Image (tube, grey):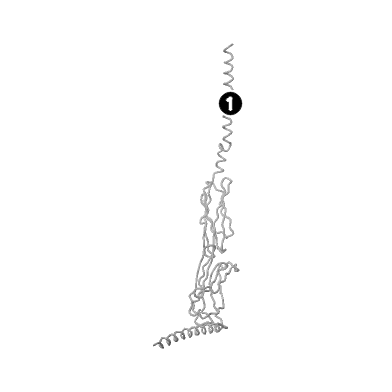
Amino acid sequence: MRFLLPLSLLVLLAAAYQEGGSARRRRAVWAQGPGDNSPVSSETEAPFWVRISPTFKAVQPGSSVWLNCSSSCPLPEGPRLHTGLQRGKTLKGSNWVSFQLLDVRAWSSDVHCYVTCAGITQGATARINAYKPPHSVILEPPVLEDGKYTLRCHVTHVFPVGFLVVTLRHGGRVIYSENLKRFTGLDLANVTLTYEYLARPCDLWQPVTCHARLNLDGLVVRSSSAPMTIFAWSPASNPLASTSIAALVGILLIVGAAYLRKYLLMQSRP
């Protein structure tokens, strides 16, 4: 009897240990989570990239552009292109598609490419800008009319006109500048700027130039005309010129009289 009690305790302890081990194994399996053992879930959540090339393109109005959309998905759905531009031909490969866009005339257009892979959709964006620098910037010779000089500057075949700034310079200073953002047309255009200028005596022989500047969201395109020269000041500025000349003559007379007096004093000394 003395041996039966310890033997019974050993049997009970062994059974409890087995149940505890099974519970620990069950908790360990539960702690892994269902996602770690699911190959479908890991494949669905695997990242993939989508690229569009080129991401930026600047062309002249009316040009055509090719864009290539590719991805790292082995079995892609798409790619799909979203754009307001006119489409042309399409070339396809296993995981890429090249799209042709025709007659690009809008100043700035965004093109979006989307690819779906295992239910997940990702995209990439490209931007196409269309612009044309001025073909020429011509400043007519200044014409004296009604006491003022009329300056005319012609900027030819430029786009987009709404991003154009035309500036007139006389010597090193700006005498007039105009922003043409009110123009919203989508075609090449010619622009003529007319400005009346009252020339001063100090402006004689100083070159007059016309400058055209396209400010295209960070891309600045500049053109300028050949210089023209003003050979005479405007009659309307004669009163100012007469006053200036009279003042200069008065200063010279005062200085001359002072030197003459000093000379006479030196001669009169023994």
Quarter of the figure that contains the N terminus: top right
As drawn, which residue projects farthest toward the top? 1
Neighbourhood count class around disc 1 (C-alpha, 10 Å): few under 14, some 14–19, many 20 upward: few
Q: Which residue is mark 1?
A: 20
As drawn, which residue projects farthest toward the left? 270
In front: 248, or 206?
A: 248
As drawn, which residue projects farthest toward the front? 270
Residue depicted at x 56% and y 47%: 117
Q: Where residue 248 appears, x then y in whole percent? A: 50, 83
**Image height check: is 269 above or below 115?**
below
Residue depicted at x 58% and y 57%: 83
Residue depicted at x 58% and y 18%: 9
Left or right of 35 on screen, residue 261: left
Q: Where residue 121 appears, x then y in whole percent? A: 58, 49
Q: Where residue 159 appears, x then y in whole percent? A: 55, 67
Q: Amino acid at mark 1?
A: Gly
In front: 245, or 89?
A: 245
**Image height check: is 203 above or below 37?**
below
Q: Where residue 109 appears, x then y in whole percent? A: 57, 60
In front: 213, or 69?
A: 213
Quarter of the figure that contains the C terminus: bottom left
